[in-house]
Every structure is written in structure tokens, then in C-alpha cells.
Image (tube, rainbow, N blue to C red):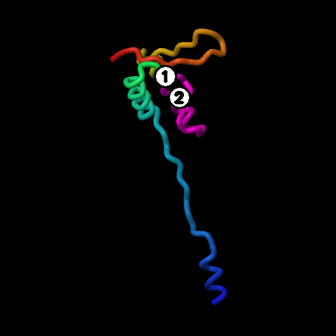
Amino acid sequence: KFLEQKELDKPLNTKITNKEFSVSERSTEIKNILKQKKKVDFTELFEIVRKDYIVVTFLAILNMARHNELKIIQNYNFDNIIIENVGD
């Protein structure tokens, strides 16, 4: 009986998986944010503080800027970075 109880006290075998983020999905999310707000502070785009999310968000922003889908504005050194919608 004691051994049975000990067996029940053991932690369950669980596996934690991370959600994967894609640059194209994140680009779509950023486009939707910019449709609503037109301008957004760079730091507002990082709702989740995880390395992979930050990298994917940054890559999405750079890719969108390369395709002239948004503008990245910083007036002075160390000033806030503003992301601005270009079209629509």
C-alpha cells in the first residue's frame, strides 16, 4: 500500500512544447496592428518576451521595410523607434 501511494505521488510525465513563430505570420500580425494604429512604438510589437519571438518579429519588420510595406523612423540617437504604415 505504501509503494502504491509513492507511485501516485510521482510527477506525471509531461512534455512542454514551444509555439513556433513564422516570419510571414508575424508580418501579417504587424500589418494588422499598423492598419489599426498607423504608427506604433517599436517596443510595442514585442508582446511576448522570448528570444525566438523577438528574432521573428525583428526579421518580419526588416523584411517589410525592405519591401516598402512600412517605414522605420528614429529622429535622434537613442530616441524611440517608430514603425509607420506606408500604404492602405
Task: Tell me the kind of residue under disc 1.
Answer: Val
What span is in magenta? 40-62
Main secondary structure type of the part rendered in magenta = helix
Up the image or down, 73 lies above or below 36; here it is above
Q: Position of residue 82 (x, y in %)?
A: 53, 18
Residue in the image at 39% along x and 30% along y: 28
Q: Which residue is mark 2?
A: 44
Query: How many C-alpha atoms fall within 10 Å of the one at disc 1: few (<14), some, or many (≥20)?
Result: some
Residue nearest the observer in this picture, 23 or 39: 39
- Circles 1 and 2, Cβ within 8 Å, touching? The answer is yes
Q: Position of residue 45 (x, y in %)?
A: 51, 29
Residue in the image at 60% along x and 78% along y: 8
Query: How many C-alpha atoms fall within 10 Å of the one at disc 2: few (<14), some, or many (≥20)?
Result: few
Task: Tell me the kind of residue under disc 2.
Answer: Glu
Q: Which residue is mark 1?
A: 40
Residue 69 is left or right of residue 46, and the answer is: left
- Give the residue at the far top of this rendering: 75
Q: Quadrant of the C terminus?
A: top left
The local secondary structure at tag 2 comes to: helix
Q: Position of residue 4 (x, y in %)?
A: 61, 85
Up the image or down, 1 lies above or below 8; here it is below
The local secondary structure at tag 1 comes to: strand
Residue nearest the observer in this picture, 28 or 38: 38
